[in-house]
Image (spheres, helix red, strand yellow):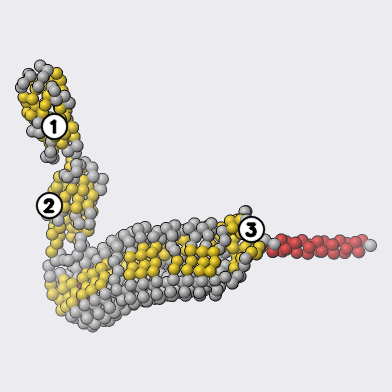
Amino acid sequence: MKNKNTGFKHLVLLFAFILCLFSCVSAKAANYYYEDGYKYTLSLGKATIISYVGSDTDFTVPSILNGKPVVKIESSAFANNKNLCSVILPDTITSMGISVFAQCENLKSIHYPEGLDRIYYRTFAGCHNLTKVNISSNIKIIEDSAFAGCTSLTYLDLPKVKEIGEYSFANCTSLSEVIFHKGFTYVGSASFKNCTNLKDVTLPLGTQTISYSAFEGCKALRHIDFPSTLVFLKSASFKDTGLVHIIVPPSVTHEEQSVFLNCKNLEEAEYHGKVIEGFTFANCTNLKKLIIGPEVTYIGSSVFDGTTQLETLQIPATTNLHSRVFIGAEALHTIYGVKNSPVEIAANNAGLNFVPVKDHSIKLNKKQLTLYTVKGKNSAVLKSVISGSTSTPTWNSSNTKVVQVNATGKVTAKGAGTAYVTVTLGNKSASCKITVKKPVLNLKNKAITLKKGSSYTISCSAVPTGKITYKSSNTKCVTVNTKGKITARQKGTATVSIKCNGITQKLKVTVK
């Protein structure tokens, strides 16, 4: 009897467990809601769209479902929907998953929520007919592959975007113009790879990195301005592009291999970065002129391999060269450089003609300068005298709280003190000592006594010189002309104010 009761109890417990499990599954299933083709969940008074199974082609995603605000769209919610043509997303959305509209082949336009600060991974990847998308000023990041394969997208203005991820616009074959703005810093790897119609790219001051293969295969890209803030040029970043002329600024201190590999339209280049790594200009079959700035400290292996029209080079005296630097440079026959430099050794080892030239030099038109902290006397232009180089020098101040200097040598006083402004070109530099002083206005007498009808000429001196003005506080008693001559009119007292360069001195006048 005991055994039978035990078996019955076990049966009851098993049944209860199954019922509980079923209830949990049912409860979980009950968390999904359906409305107008949307599958969604509710949690903490907010709605999340899971998927859309409707057949509408042009629609506005609701901002409210079941009386709750729609704040999130889950990953792949609209992916592979062949019906979608245009979508307006509500600004109540604050989060999205990945691949939300991926492979929506007929999607042409979309309004993206104002409340989001990024476009997520593969959000629009493979949307072949997408031609228009608003990038609001709230968008700061475009994640990897966000628009990859959007072959109908033609134009992009990215007002506040700071960085774009890997393959973000890769294979957007109709994209012709991209504009970045102040605050942008980073071009991700392969972000514009094979954008074969891309012609215009604006990179603002502040851009620091162009990563691996960023513009590889952009055949229509003829020109790009590298900002003076650029630091990193990664491997193959402009491989197989249509660039015709480039200038690499001195700010580029980290360059990797093959940056301009196979740029067959490239005719002229100026390179002022720190190093030119291996294969940088390899197979640039139309390259005729290359200026190597004195900033370049090293040139790597096979940099000129496959160049067929580059006949001569001038290389700075302080540049070190890889033993295979000239390998494959088919047309190269003459190297210009400073005698007894690494350049001469490399040219001789390669069997090239070496022609000695004078090393470059740089001087300033002034060695000392005095400025004042007063408008009109607080700035000057230093001029650099350069020989043996066509490169642009860099300027800096030893103390920017005293003196600041811009890229053309204009110096501006900021505070009293002493600073040195230095201009540098490669391994050569010249400096000017700048002393900044506060203006001074000296008055010989602070008080005088005059007899009625008599006169007195104020004695004062100003450093720096400037226009001095005079004014009497009591013209019935004392008058003063523009040259500082005082005339006593009647008994009494007056104060004459003397002003120059923003400084005021006062002279007390008593008439008896």
Q: Position of residue 267 (x, y in %)?
A: 24, 76
User: Label 2 crowding class (10 Å Cα cut-off): few <14, some 14-19, many 20+?
Assistant: some
Amino acid at dot 1: Tyr
Please identify the quadrant where the C terminus is shown.
top left
Q: Which mark is residue 26?
A: none
Q: Name the residue that disc number 3 marks.
A: 66
Foreground residue, 158 or 356? 158
Amino acid at dot 2: Lys
Residue at horizontal 75 percent and vertical 64 percent from the top: 22
Q: Name the residue that disc number 2 marks.
A: 366
Q: Residue furthest top?
A: 512
Foreground residue, 371 or 70? 70
Disc with the residue nearer the chain's start (3 vs 1): 3
Disc with the residue nearer the chain's start (2 vs 3): 3
Instruction: Confirm or deny contact between disc 2 and disc 3 (CB under 8 A).
Output: no
Q: Name the residue that disc number 1 marks.
A: 470
Q: How far apart in space, not on screen, are marks 3 and 1 (Cα)?
A: 79 Å
Q: In terms of secondary structure, where does tag 1 sit? A: strand
Foreground residue, 360 or 19? 19
Amino acid at dot 3: Asn
Residue at horizontal 16 percent and vertical 24 percent from the top: 474
Q: Quadrant of residue 469?
A: top left
